[in-house]
Amino acid sequence: MNGPKAGGNKRHTVMAEINMVPFIDVCLVLLIIFMVMTPMLVQSQIKINVPTASSAEPSTKKNDMILVQVDAKGGIYVDDQRIPTDRLADLFKKRLVKNKDNPIVIEADKDVPFNSVVSVMDAAKAAGATKLGVSAKAEKKNKR
């Protein structure tokens, strides 16, 4: 009776340890995934509070439209990438090479300094844009 249940022999005792290596591997893989995805998610979420207008019409977003977003702090974004003001005209020229009639639509926050919007308009004019628009939300009509 010298088996594992007999108190005299310690060579045959059950080892009760948890192997942590697979758990750590999974955690590191998840950490890497989150580190890679976070900048992409943050970039695409530019917060812009567009002003309302009673004459605003719903737009049909076209693939050839150039959307310029200006946030409340005056940051200018084209295709969710922050662009310095001095590089805007060159960017517009490159995008307007195929068709000068491609519209440039400015989506500016209602609290943005007007100077930021004017600088975008100036860059569009310098690039030779023929169509320029400003984005606004339609006012909600009271139902009475």
Image (cartoon, grey):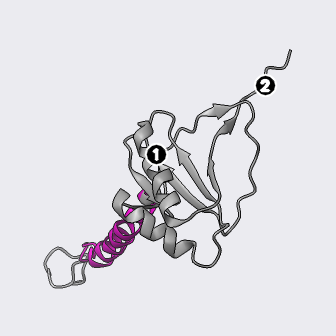
Quarter of the C terminus within the rendering: top right
> Looking at this view, is 32 or 57 the one in front?
57
> What's the magenta bit mostly, secondary-structure-wise?
helix
**Residue indicated by mark 1:** 118
Indicate the position of residue 3 as horizontal and vertical percent values: 24, 83
The answer to whether the residue labelled 1 contacts the one labelled 2, judged by CB atoms less than 8 Å apart, is: no
Indicate the position of residue 136 as horizontal and vertical percent values: 64, 40
Q: Which structural element holds mark 2?
A: loop
**Residue indicated by mark 2:** 141
Q: Amino acid at mark 2?
A: Lys
> Quadrant location of residue 2?
bottom left
Seen in the picture, residue 125 relative to 47 is either above or below; the reply is below
Q: Is residue 76 left or right of residue 10?
A: right
The numbered mark at residue 37 is: none
Say whether disc 1 or disc 2 marks the residue closer to the N-terminus: 1
- Identify which residue is drawn at 47% across, 53% down: 122
Query: Nearer the observer, disc 1 or disc 2?
Result: 1
> Looking at this view, is 53 or 114 the one in front?
114
Q: Amino acid at mark 1?
A: Val
- Identify which residue is drawn at 38% across, 63% down: 39
Seen in the picture, residue 30 relative to 119 is either above or below; the reply is below
> Looking at this view, is 27 or 17 the one in front?
27
Which stretch appears magenta? 14-42
Seen in the picture, residue 112 relative to 102 is either above or below; the reply is above
Indicate the position of residue 42 as horizontal and vertical percent values: 42, 57
Q: Is residue 8 left or right of residue 21?
A: left
